[in-house]
Image (tube, coloured by chain):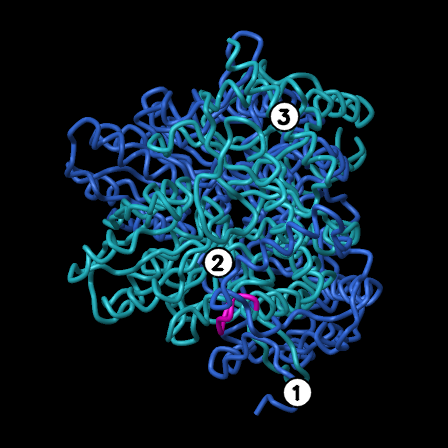
Chain colours: A blue, B cyan
Amino acid sequence: MNQILEKSIFEYSREGRGAAAQQPPALVGAGAAAAHEAQSALPAALRRRSKPLLPEVSELDVVRHFTRLSQLNFSIDTNFYPLGSCTMKYNPKACNQYAMLPEFLARHPLAPDSQGQGFLSCMVELQEMLEEVTGMKAVSLNPMAGAQGEFAGVAMIRAYHHARGDLARNEIIVPEAAHGTNPATATMCGCVVREIPVDAEGDVDIAALEKAVGPHTAGIMLTNPSTLGVFERKIQEVARIVHGAGGLLYYDGANLNAILGKVRPGDMGFDVIHMNLHKTFSTPHGGGGPGAGAVGVSARLEPFLPVPVVGREGEAYRWLTEVDRPQSIGRLSAFMGNAGVLLRAYIYMRMLGRSGMSQVGEFATLNANYLLARLRAAGFDLAYPTRRASHEFIITLRRQAKELNVTAMDVAKRLLDYGFHAPTTYFPLLVPECLLIEPTETESRETLDAFVEAMVAILAETETDAAKLKGAPWTMPVRRLDDVRAAKQLELTWKPVNSAA
Amino acid sequence: MAFIPHTEHDIREMLAVIGAPSIDALFDEIPAALRVQGLEGIPEAMSEMAIARLMSERARQDGRPLSFLGAGAYEHHIPSAVWAITTRGEFYSAYTPYQAEASQGTLQLIHEHQTMISSLTGMEVANASLYDGGSAVAEAALMAVRAHRKSKSLRILVPSTVNPNYRRVAVSTAGNQGLRFESVAYSRETGCIDPLALEALRGEDLAALVIQQPNFFGQLEDVDALTDWAHSAGMLVIAVVNPTSLAMLKPPGEWGTKGADICVGEGQPLGVPLSSGGPYFGFMTTRLEYVRAMPGRIVGRTVDLEGKRGYTLTLQAREQHIRRGKATSNICTNQGLLMTAATIYMSLLGPAGLAKVAESCMARTQQLQSALCRVRGVRAAFAGARFHESVLLLDRPAAAVLRSLEAQGILGGVDLSADYPELGPALLVCATETKTDDDIERFANALGVALQAARAA
C-alpha cells in the first residue's frame, strides 16, 4: 500500500484552471439564440450568486489525485479481506465489463419495455434463478441494499396480517445476536422489537421463544447460519412454534453464502427472505455500496411484493406495476432498484451455473473450517468450540484482554501491518473481544496459511511485545485515529488550513 | 470450478487438518431432511467467452434510440476518466471503511464529496449518500419529523409538482411509522405550486413542506417565497434539487430569509449512467444543528496518534449497528461507488464546467420547446422559467404519438396522462447538453409525422 498521504483535491485548485475537454462546446446559431432566450427568462432572484466549492483542476490532476487515493485502500483485489458477515469474495471482472455494455448503460429507466427486451430477459431469468436457489415462490429485485430488503420483508409481513384483519400483530422477535439492522428495520416498519436469548451453543433458546410468541407476534427475523457463525439446528422447531402462533418467518440472507446449493430457506420454512447480492452473488461492495437486496416470498406473500417486478407475457417481458399488483407494499426506489448491480449478479450466476452454485457453499465452509482448525491449534479460543463453522466463525480474545490487556481491536489493527484486512470486530455484541472471520470460497489455501502465520505471530507478540499491538498499525498511511476527537470537534467538510481555527 | 482455486490435493489436506472425511461431512449439523437435492432450475455454467457473447446479444436487443426522456434520470456526457478510476479494484472491491487506517482513500474521497455537495447545495454538512432520489425524500421526511423541535406533527406537504414516484417511495417507506403525505395543487398557468392552495393550509400543524426545484415539470418554483411561507407557518423546508442545475440556480441554503433545512436529491446527473434506473445515489445535506438527526454514514477529519491528519467514520451513535431499534434509519450499505463517480465528475467539471453543462441543458430545452411548438397541434403547457424539461400539450393521445415516434427511432418523452390526467394529452420532454441541432430537428420532424398519422387514423 501507498503510505504517502495525498493532499486534498481542493489544494490542487487554481482559479481559472479546468478540464476543457469535458465542457460542452459553446452554442451557435439556434442554440445560442435559445440560450439567450432562456437566460433572459430566468429571474435574478433564482440565480446562484456564489461559486460552488468545486476544484478547478486539470484532467491529469483529477486522474492522479483519485488514483493515489485509491492506493490508500485495502480491497479484495489487493488484500485478503476476511470481514465476517460481509462475504468479501472475488468480484469477477467479467461481471463488471458485460454489465457495462453501452446499450445497458444508455437505457433510460422510463424507456418502453419494447426498448429493453434484452435487459428485461436478464431480469426475469435472475428472478427465476433466485427463486430456485432459495426455494421461494416469487422474487422482487427492487430493494437497493440488504437493509432495504429487510424493510420490504417486514413491511410485507405487516401488510399480510393487515390484509387478514389481524391488526394486533405488531411484535417482531429477533435473537439477541441479530445484526443491528433487524431491530432498526422493525422500528421503521412501525413494529415493536422483542429480543430473545440464544443458548450456550448458539441455538435459539426454544423455551424463551415459546414464551415470547402469542397473538401479538407478527414474525421472527432469523439469520441462518446465525451471526454466531453456526447453523441454527432447531430451525424446524422454531418454524413450527412461530407458525403455530400465527407469525411468519423472515430470513435475513446475510449469510446465504454458507448454504448456497446445500439447503434452501424456503425448505426451512421461511415465508420471506432478502438476499444480499453484493455478498452471495459477488457484486461489488464499492467502498460502501451499491448493494442489492432482492426479496423472495412464499405464495401467500406474493401479492405484497414491492413493485415493479418483471413478468413474462408470451415471448415478451414487461414490468408489472401497482396496476397489476394492487396489494403491493409499493415502491422503494424512483425506478426499479439497482439495475446495473442486478446485471452483475445475473452474469455471476450464469458463469457459476448449477454445479458452481453448490460449490460456493461447500468451499466457503471448507475454508472457514480449515481456518478454524488451524487457529484453534495455534492457541486461539473459539466462541463456540463444540460447533462446526459455517462460512464464518468467531474467536474471542477475552483471555488475552484480561491477562495481557490486549484487545480484539489491537489484534485487528496489527493484522493490517501484516497485509491483511481485519476480520469484523466487536460483532456480534454477545461475544466479548471477538473477531468474526469469513474467508470465502475464492481464497486459496496458501492465502489462508499466510493469514494463520500472521495470527500466530501476533499471538506471540501479545506475550512478548504487546506495545507492537497497542500502537498498531505502524505501516499504514496513518497511525490509529482519534475517533473521539472526530466526533467532538466536527470537521465534516474541507476548509483551507489557515482558516481552520 | 469457477473462481474457486482449490486443487484435489488442497481439498484432501484441508479435510485432514479439519479431521472431516469429506466436504459433505461439514454440513452434518443441518437436518438431513432439509438438504437440497439439486437445482434443476439453474442452467449449466458458462465460460467468460460464452457469457460475453450472450450479454452482447442481449444488449443489442435493447438498441440505442435517440432519447428525450427525463423525469428524474438524465442523459449527460460522462468523462472517460470517471469510470476508468471508479472501477479501479481499490475502490470497486473495498467495503465500508470500518478499518479507517486501511481505508483512507475511500474516507478522504467521501470527505471531499461532503465538501462539494454541501457547497453546491449551500448547506453545512452532507452524508456519504442514500440509495436514490426517491428514498432520499423518504429519509428527509423522517428526519424532518425527528428534527422538528416545536411540532410533533407527522404530516408532510408534498405538492403535486414533486416527482410522483418520490411521493410513492415516501409513502411506502415512511407510512408505516405514521407519516402522512398530503398534496398541494399546482397552478395550471405556471406549472408551479399554487400559492392560494398553500395559503389555505396556514394554521394547520404540519412538520415540513417539500419543494422540488426545478419541479417535476421542469418549471422553476418561487423558492424564496415558498421557504419563507413554510417557516412562518412553523414548518421545516425539505428541498429536492437537481445537482446540475445548482451550478446556475440559487442553492437551497440561500432560499428565502433562512434557507432550506434539509436538502436532498438524485445524484445520477453527476456522472452516473442511466442504466435502466440504477444504481444511482441520493444525496442529503443539512444545517450543522440537525446533523445528529441525519441518517447514513458521515466522515469526519481527525488526527492520528502522531498528530497526522486522517479521516474516519463519525457520529456513529446515530446508526443501526450502535443504536439498533433506536437508530435514525436502518441504512448501512449505501451507494458508495456512485458517490465516488460523482466526486470525480464534479472535480473534472469544476464550477465553470458544471455551469456550462447547466446553461447548455437549459438552452437546448428552450430550443427543443420552440422547435416542437412550431409543429401543428403542439403547445407548451406552462409559462415561466424552466430548467431542462418542459411539458407539451398535444391534440392527439400521447401514447399513440409516442409509439409512432418510437417506430421512428425516437423516445419522445414521458406520457403524463396517468399521473396528471387533468392536462389531457401531455408529454414531459427533456434535452440536455448531449442534444444537437440535428437531434432536435429530427424530433420535430418525427413529431409532425406522428401527429399527422394520428389525425389520419
Looking at the image, tell me whether mark 3 or mark 1 is earlier in sequence order.
Answer: 3
Q: Nearer the viewer, residue B41 or A330?
A: A330
C-alpha span from label 2 to label 3: 39 Å
Chain letter belonging to callout 3: A
Q: Nearer the viewer, residue B254 or B169?
A: B254
The residue under the point 46% across, 41% down is A333
The answer to whether residue B251 is above or below residue A153 is below
Looking at the image, tell me whether mark 2 or mark 3 is earlier in sequence order.
Answer: 3
The answer to whether residue B373 is above or below residue B408 is below
Amino acid type assigned to the residue bearing label 2 in the image: Phe
Residue A355 can be seen in this image? no
C-alpha span from label 3 to label 1: 49 Å
* Badge number at residue A427: 2
Chain letter belonging to callout 1: A
Taking the magenta stretch, the answer to whether it contains residue A85 is no
Left or right: A360 in relation to A447: left
In what element is the residue under mark 2? loop
Query: Which image quadrant for residue B225?
Result: bottom left
Q: Which residue is mark 3?
A: A119
The span shown in magenta is: B120-126
Quadrant of the image containing the N terminus of chain A: bottom right
Quadrant of the image containing the C terminus of chain A: bottom right
Looking at the image, tell me whether mark 1 or mark 2 is earlier in sequence order.
Answer: 2
Q: Which residue is mark 1?
A: A497
Q: Nearer the viewer, mark 1 or mark 2?
A: 1
In what element is the residue under mark 3? helix
